[in-house]
Image: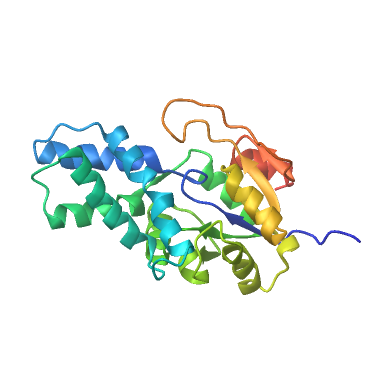
Amino acid sequence: MTTPEVRALLFDVFGTVVDWRLGVAREVEALAARRGVALDGGEFADRWRARYQPAMEEVRAGRRAFVPLDVLHRENLEGVVSDLGVTGWDASDLDELNLAWHRLDPWPDSVEGLTRLKARFIIGTQSNGNVALMVDMAKRAGLPWDVILGAEVTGHYKPSPRSYSEACRLLGLLPEQCMLVAAHNNDLVAAREACGMRTAFIARPFEYGEEREAEPTAEYDYAASDLVDLAARLGC
């Protein structure tokens, strides 16, 4: 049987399209400087991100009702502040800092790569970020999405199978007509094995600050160095 032609590219966003660590660290350090607190922004960002999957697992496991990622981020922020013993930050400071995730910078290749891919494919988010977060980020960073999909739209956090299958269904496409583009092997494997999506790995060796190995650990349809490289491989 012939494999259907890919019509849509759905993108993981945090780490794949935008540099979450640098953006969060920058805003943490700016707030700390205003309040006279000495903090390592990178360490703070890492601690905040480390709470990301455990918080979503509470939803995936059915131990709490679905809530948008902004809510989980805000709860996790309070936990990091408590863990580090940070004082002098009030609720309004935390509310504003929580919006750091809305203001992340794209990787240098992201806008060009997405623009080239958009000329041939439907492009959209397949992110755990909520709609308001994704829209704010896109407007600030110039990300040319056709559609915002992901957890808040599907009601499921990745890597739950329905997070992928529902996104494909909403586009009126078969999973085989959709390709997940991500820098994270677990995301890609879940989309392929649980849903039957096509897959493209993007290397982001600086996602966690210092350069580290960023290689595909499974067989994917494509493996690219960045989104411009992926566009070239797909003839865009």
Residue at coordinates 91% horizontally, 61% vertically from top-left?
1
Percent x, y of residue 3: 84, 59
User: Which residue is rendered at x = 37% and y = 44% of the image?
Assistant: 49
Q: Nearer the viewer, residue 78 or 9?
A: 78
- Whether residue 236 is visible, yes or no, is yes
* Left or right: where 179 falls relative to 24: right
Q: In percent of the image, x 24 and y 41: which residue is there?
A: 28
State which quadrant residue 37 falls in: top left
Question: Outermost residue, right direction?
Answer: 1
Figure disc tally: 0
Residue 120 seen from this side: no
Q: Position of residue 65 (x, y in %)?
A: 40, 71
In this view, the residue in front, 141 or 132, is: 132
Q: Position of residue 212 (x, y in %)?
A: 51, 26
Residue 213 location (% of width, % of height) = 56, 27
Q: Is residue 63 above or below residue 25?
A: below
- Going by the image, does 127 lie left or right of 67? right
